[in-house]
Amino acid sequence: MLKPSKTPLTEEQVNKGLRLVELDGMADEALVVLTSGTFLVALALSLGASNIQIGLLAGLPVFMNIFQLISIYLVQKYHNRKMITTIGNFLARFPILAVGIIPFVFSAGTSINTLIFLLAMHYFCGSIAGASWNSWMKDLIPQKRLGSFFSNRLRLTQTLNVVMSLSLALILDWVKKHHPGMETTAYAIMFLTGGCIGIWGSWLLSRTPEPPSEFSSENLFKLLKRPLLDANFRRLLFFNSFWAFALNLATPFFTVFMLKSIGLPLFTVIAVGIAGQLAGIFSLRLWGRFSDAYSNKTIIRVAAPTYIVCILGWSFVTLPETDAVQISLIALISILSGSATAGINMAMTNIGLKLAPRDSSIAYISVKNMSVAFISAAAPIVGGYLADYFADRTLVTNLEWVGPKSHVIIHLMNLNNWNFLFVIGGLLAIIALQTLKLVKEEGEVERAKAIREMRTIVRGEVRQLATKESLIDFVSLPVTVPIRITKKIIETQQAIHARLFAGFNQANGLSDVDNKVGADISITKAPEKSNPV
């Protein structure tokens, strides 16, 4: 069951494998929603986590990628990526289950440290599984379907993310309001549920076929040197690491900023996050098309500036004095950054797979992940230190007008605490984006030309969605959906009746009659065959 195929996979086997990979992706996404992100930050804050500990929790998933060296060694020795991935994922779920019992076993002073330790074990096993999974997917997914498959997979997983996040936020708010003493128990149940779903995802992977592949027999260290000797891939490593450091310096603290500094309720934080995820879902289909048409590098060069503006925009959300305006600005930033992030993440994954040679793809991908891990894992910890440093420092810039009968002050900038962090992260991201120009990718299109063509396609999509017929269809969905379901049931019944009549005719030696259900049905005796003389 865990052995790779000895012969090339058929098209049917490939399609079956891709369906299982999509289901496994949804299981992993459910695990992520239940055990990370906003809910993990809220749990950590309830356990008394400091800024440094929040940064450490954010940096752990990336830092543990350095242990992908173990995965390369295991793949070289056993030539079985399916087994390594499945067992690694399976073992990674048990620390998640253990986290669920922390509130019942440990005191508040030690539980946050235990949480960090167990999550480190979870990410350790996951990193071993992740390296072999990347190499496995490179051989399983056809090259021409790479962009469209991952965009569709991301769209499915993000849709699930939105539904689960909204539901959990409503449940947690209800628990806080009616049973405040049960909040910790609710988080524990979420982790236990996430661990069980993750185990189901590991079972799905065990049923996914692995195509035969060639594995390099080089010494491990010589194999790892190959990506570093590849000048183009080395430039990709530098850009990816620099970009990840700039983003991880600030983005892990957006949730903390909303919960602690602005004081938004958990439901509002989840709601604006969902707005960004919905934007990512709706844009993924276009990003997938653009990726296949214009190259992944072009997608990054188009989407990254928008994301940088969003990072810098967090520094200005507190300038308005009304809560409604602040929440509106946060929602707008989330929508724009969600759309941009969807394209960037998809392109980052695809370009790494595309530039990696087939015979040593696991080494290339692992070196890429480890280089990002070494540099960007420190970013949230550095961000935590910077947040503490700027906690009692403020930079104010105002535009002031003083007249005989008026005195007007317009607040242009008010940087304090987290805002300094967002500005620094945005400026570093601008510098990092300049290094992408040095990376070469086959099929690359000029950014200006790609933007013109993308704009034309997007306008066409908007016009199509905005037609009178489309709007009528959307408004009439509550009526048309039941009608379509009823029509589908009737068609299914007709097909069943047709099969029954066909079977009856064949059993009784009667000729087939092409009749529709509800029409007059005549049955004629089939003419007897004459025996040859």
Image (tube, grey):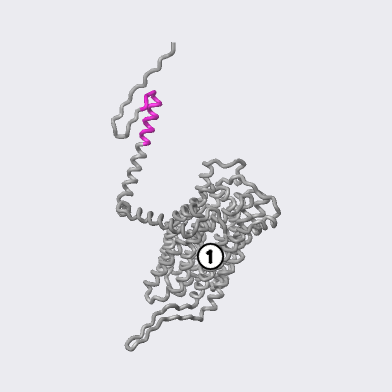
The percent coordinates of residue 26 (x first, y second) are: 49, 54
The percent coordinates of residue 356 (x first, y second) are: 60, 54
The percent coordinates of residue 284 (x first, y second) are: 45, 56
- The range drawn in magenta is 495-512
Quadrant of residue 431 within the rendered picture: bottom right
The residue to which callout 1 is attached is 433
Would you say the magenta stretch is mainly helix, strand or loop? Answer: helix
Give the position of the C terminus as an image quadrant.
top left
For residue 3, above or below residue 95: above
Point 56% across, 50% down: residue? 137
Residue 499 covered by magenta stretch: yes
Instruction: Name the secondary structure under disc 1.
Output: helix
Residue 273 covered by magenta stretch: no
For residue 111, above or below residue 400: above
Mark 1 packing: few (<14 Cα in 10 Å), some, or many (20+)? Answer: some
Q: Residue furthest top?
A: 533
